Image (cartoon, rainbow, N blue to C red):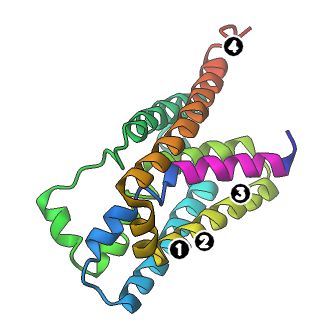
Amino acid sequence: MSEWAHLLKTGIALFAIVNPIGGLTVFVTATEGWRDADRLRIARTIAFTVFTVLTLSVFIGDTLLDFFGIGIPSFQVGGGILLLLMAISMLQARHGFVRQNPEEEAVAQQEGMAVVPLSVPLLAGPGAISSMIIAAEQSDSLWGHVLLVIPVAAVALLVWGIFSLATPISQRLGTIGINIVTRLMGLILAAMSVEFIARGLGRLFPGLLA
């Protein structure tokens, strides 16, 4: 697979995991009654936070794994299982399985809601972070890591664009439309998660896939 094809595949998978379409209803509800200027500002903050978190995952994610003594094959299997659970949730049109306690809901009413929970963990959650660490491990050169910033930036720009147009998009798609898009993204993500798991198992047990 060529480098650009790999980047395209990574970008599509990342968009499916981040799933900004599925997060539209959460964003619209959380910012209900806000001025348009405030919504645009929050949308920019969310996109920048997503970009920052995922970029850091590319460059220092493997260092964190080394610190905790976690091998990449084990992380591939664990991350793949996590992505598969997310995919199953999305296929059932659930827009995430992260729950908030009352304290987190109170924080969400403040300015910090753009970072928590709208950016992390709603969009740049464990699944997205895991996928970028795995992608970075597959691109073992510094240049390969730098190139991975391209799909991260593209997804962040899509997040900004979609959330900036959150009200008209959610009104046009409606609940059924958002659920359809979420299920399609879930199907793509399910296939990607199986691939992650298979690669991890193949490296943990070299004779398994022979």
Q: Amino acid at mark 2?
A: Leu
**Disc 1 to disc 2: CB gap under 8 Å:** yes
Element at label 2: helix
- Residue situated furthest right in the rendering: 2
Mark 2 surroundings within 10 Å by alpha-carbon count, few (fewer than 14), some (14 through 19), many (20 or more): some
Q: Amino acid at mark 3?
A: Leu
The relative height of residue 113 versus residue 208 in the rendered view (above or below) is below
The secondary structure type at the circle numbered 4 is loop
Residue hosting label 3: 148
Amino acid type shown at disc 4: Pro
User: Start and end of the magenta stretch?
Assistant: 4-16
Residue at 31 percent across and 44 percent down: it is 97
Q: Nearer the viewer, residue 24 or 85?
A: 24
Q: Where does label 2 land, which residue?
A: 157
| Placement of 10 over or under 198, stated as above or below | below
The residue at which mark 4 appears reads as: 206
| Residue 116, visible in the rendered structure | no
Q: What numbered label is drawn on residue 160?
A: 1
